[in-house]
Image (cartoon, rainbow, N blue to C red):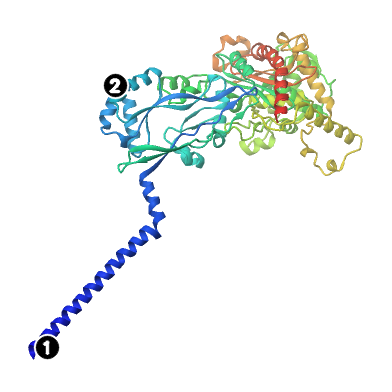
């Protein structure tokens, strides 16, 4: 009986254990089946994508940068094909051996070799390592010859920036170089498109229009094995080229400006007096931006950096100079506009004046005698302008100067290096120097000295607005679509002048009454057009009449005839001893010589272009700067017809 009960209990225990084990198996197998179902059916797309990510890999290619063109469509900053040597470290079996061989074949010095090693250590193993950014043809053929022994090395054809006119456009275009950590931090567009070796704008228009120029990356898709090694290329997508930007600059005139300023420090600016288009803008000396494309060597860098003429400084936009006598047309206009003088106002110049124990000299020791506005401007009589500045005062002079663009940036935010300059008044001195204005400072301000600081481009804009009859223009260096022609702008200016006549006759319109006149396009900058004409005639006399300061640089042919004003800007106080010695420019140490300046517009009978010239430490404006204008104006006028034909062709295409 006991045996039977024991057997029953034993069977029950076995059955219970088998049930538990069976149930456990069922649960385990059920879980496995459910998981397999999840992997194969429910999450199929997810794991297929992950599998592809392991099997496929994308490589981004450097974007192709947009080009810069001059006004006539010539490429002034483009792209050229270059040879490079690439290595993908993960595909190299013996990286150390490969680098030793490449060092021998390419004649890499220790510094270049170590630079490559450092770069390799910073990159991911599947990223392209650029061993040489610009192989010569000899190096390229040599690498290909030994390619069987250089497993993992890939000679490739790539694209790089190129500046075909070398140093002619450097201070306008700037240059590109490899993107730095700062570039990536400050610009999201650069960061999103960055690949090893990407070049970005560092200065000038290359930097300003970086986001438009950079283009988009091309994409290469490869199938890779478990070790990440490329097996085959599956797809290739071309990137989009960056935007092409056209400038208003004429290369031929720009080249002549460069030639005329050779071995000198200075600036030349040329501007259309109606459209505001900048025809030339040269700062000298310059440097070749191609030197920076693949990293400038120390010798070249030191030559540029240590040059006493400062080729790295854009003198047209960043150079601040006392305008000297080129400021006298503005002083004369302000005095006329404020009713301080008329064309017959005369001063007897005796070579100097005394005021409060201080002597103020005219440049001509014996004086000019009795002079009126025209003869004073013609001979650049300082005594005359001392007197009218005294009667005018700096506060009213500043208002007139600001109207004509002095004291403000000419091109807005196009160039981040452009300076505003300084047109002082009594309030400025009190706020900045904590002192009151004195009469002697007014006198020297009247001849463009003292606190007054201008850029060459500001002087060019001022001259252009005097030349067009006293109307506001909007300087530009980029060709814009649907821009108004000079003829259309003239009509607007004539309409604004007519409105002024109606105002003077008591027929002022509602907008004038509400004080909106200054909001007009190409609004007038004068009260009386006769005053502008008087200044123009005085500038003409300065260049084209006997005893004019730039008479020796005149052109008698009416086709090329221009009007101008010389300027000599002091860089130091002239002592009594220096006056008695009366040394020639060549006898004075370079850094103590005066700056030479000249402003002009022409052709005089039907003006179209204005220019400004500054030669640092050039001595006299009449002997150094004015002769440059004579050589330049002939080409400017001769190129005008071609420029107009090109403009018409562009209008037809639009």
Q: Secondary structure at mark 2?
A: helix
Q: Residue at x 72, y 28 (%)?
A: 651
Residue that label 1 marks: 5
Q: Are marks 2 and 1 in contact (CB under 8 Å)?
A: no
Sequence order check: which comes first, mark 2 or mark 1? 1
Local crowd size for mark 1, using a 10 Å CA cut-off: few (<14), some (14–19), many (≥20):
few
Q: Residue at x 30, y 67 (%)?
A: 30
Q: Please say if 364 is above or below 82.
A: above
Answer with left or right where residue 618 lies relative to residue 439.
left
Q: Is residue 359 visible?
A: no
Checking the image for residue 400, the label placed there is: none
Instruction: Name the image quarter holding residue 55.
Output: top left
Q: Position of residue 535 (x, y in %)?
A: 79, 22
Local crowd size for mark 2, using a 10 Å CA cut-off: few (<14), some (14–19), many (≥20):
few
Answer with left or right where residue 197 lies relative to residue 12.
right
Answer with left or right where residue 158 lies relative to residue 94.
right
Residue that label 2 marks: 104
Q: Position of residue 435 (x, y in %)?
A: 64, 36
Taking depth in this image into account, of 533 and 22 the one nearest to the observer is 22
Taking depth in this image into account, of 298 and 330 the one nearest to the observer is 298
The quadrant of the image that shows the N terminus is: bottom left
Instruction: Name the image quarter holding residue 181.
Output: top left
Q: Position of residue 144 (x, y in %)?
A: 34, 22
Q: Residue at x 44, y 20 (%)?
A: 300
Distance in Å between CA atoms under marks 2 and 1: 94 Å
Q: Is residue 404 visible?
A: yes
Taking depth in this image into account, of 654 and 554 the one nearest to the observer is 654
Q: Secondary structure at mark 1?
A: helix
């Amino acid at each position: 009986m006991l045996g039977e009960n024991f057997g029953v209990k034993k069977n029950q225990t076995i059955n219970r254990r088998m049930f538990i084990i069976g149930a456990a198996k069922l649960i385990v197998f059920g879980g496995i089946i459910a998981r397999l179902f999840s992997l194969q059916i429910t999450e199929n797309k997810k794991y297929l994508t992950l599998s592809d990510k392991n099997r496929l890999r994308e490589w981004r290619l450097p974007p192709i940068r947009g080009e810069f063109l001059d006004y006539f469509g010539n490429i002034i900053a483009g792209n050229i094909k270059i040879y490079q040597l690439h290595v993908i470290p993960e595909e190299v079996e013996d990286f150390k051996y490969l680098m030793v061989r490449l060092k021998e074949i390419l004649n890499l010095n220790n510094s270049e070799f170590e630079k490559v090693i450092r770069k390799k250590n910073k990159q991911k193993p599947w990223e392209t390592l650029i061993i040489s950014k610009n192989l010569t043809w000899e190096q390229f053929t040599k690498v290909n010859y030994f390619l069987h022994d250089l497993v993992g090395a890939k000679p490739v054809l790539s694209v790089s920036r190129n500046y075909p006119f070398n140093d002619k456009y450097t201070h306008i275009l700037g240059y590109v170089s490899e993107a730095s950590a700062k570039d990536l931090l400050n610009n999201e567009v650069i960061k999103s498109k960055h690949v090893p070796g990407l070049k970005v704008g560092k200065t000038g228009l290359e930097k300003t229009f970086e986001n438009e120029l950079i283009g988009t990356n091309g994409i290469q898709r490869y199938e890779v094995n478990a070790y990440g090694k490329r097996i085959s290329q599956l797809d290739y997508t071309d990137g989009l080229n960056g935007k092409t930007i056209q400038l208003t600059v004429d290369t031929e005139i720009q080249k002549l400006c460069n030639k005329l300023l050779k071995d000198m420090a200075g600036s030349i600016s040329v501007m259309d007096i109606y459209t505001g288009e900048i025809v030339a803008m040269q700062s000298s000396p310059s440097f070749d931006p191609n030197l920076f494309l693949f990293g400038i060597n120390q010798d070249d860098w030191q030559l540029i950096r240590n040059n006493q003429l400062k080729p790295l400084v854009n003198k047209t936009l960043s150079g601040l100079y006392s305008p000297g006598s080129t400021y006298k047309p503005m002083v004369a206009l302000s005095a006329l506009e404020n009713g301080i003088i008329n064309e017959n106002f005369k001063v007897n110049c005796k070579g100097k004046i005394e005021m409060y124990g201080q002597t103020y000299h005219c440049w001509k020791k014996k004086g000019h005698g009795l002079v009126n506005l025209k003869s004073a401007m013609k001979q650049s009589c300082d005594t005359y302008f001392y007197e009218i500045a005294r009667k005018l005062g700096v506060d009213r002079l500043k208002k007139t100067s600001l109207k004509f663009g002095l004291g403000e940036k000419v091109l807005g935010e196009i160039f981040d290096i452009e300076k505003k300059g300084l047109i002082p008044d009594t309030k400025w001195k009190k706020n900045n120097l904590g002192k009151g204005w004195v009469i002697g400072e007014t006198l020297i301000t009247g001849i463009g000295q003292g606190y007054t600081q201008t850029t060459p481009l500001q002087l060019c804009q001022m001259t252009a607005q005097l030349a067009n009859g006293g109307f506001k223009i909007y300087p530009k260096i980029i060709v814009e679509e649907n821009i108004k022609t000079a003829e259309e702008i003239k009509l607007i200016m004539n309409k604004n002048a007519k409105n002024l006549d109606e105002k003077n006759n008591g027929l002022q319109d509602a907008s004038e009454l509400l004080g909106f006149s200054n909001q007009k396009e190409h609004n007038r900058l004068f009260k009386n057009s006769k005053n502008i004409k008087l200044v123009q005639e005085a500038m003409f006399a300065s260049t084209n009449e006997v005893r004019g300061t730039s008479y020796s640089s005149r052109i008698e042919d009416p086709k090329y005839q221009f009007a101008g004003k010389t300027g000599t800007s002091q860089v130091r106080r002239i002592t009594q001893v220096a006056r008695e010695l009366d040394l020639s420019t060549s006898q004075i140490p370079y850094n103590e010589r005066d700056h030479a300046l000249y402003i002009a517009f022409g052709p005089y009978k039907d003006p179209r272009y204005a220019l400004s010239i500054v030669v640092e430490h050039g001595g006299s404006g009449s002997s150094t700067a004015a002769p440059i204008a004579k050589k330049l104006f002939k080409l400017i006028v001769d190129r005008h017809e071609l420029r107009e034909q090109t403009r018409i062709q562009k209008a037809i295409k639009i």
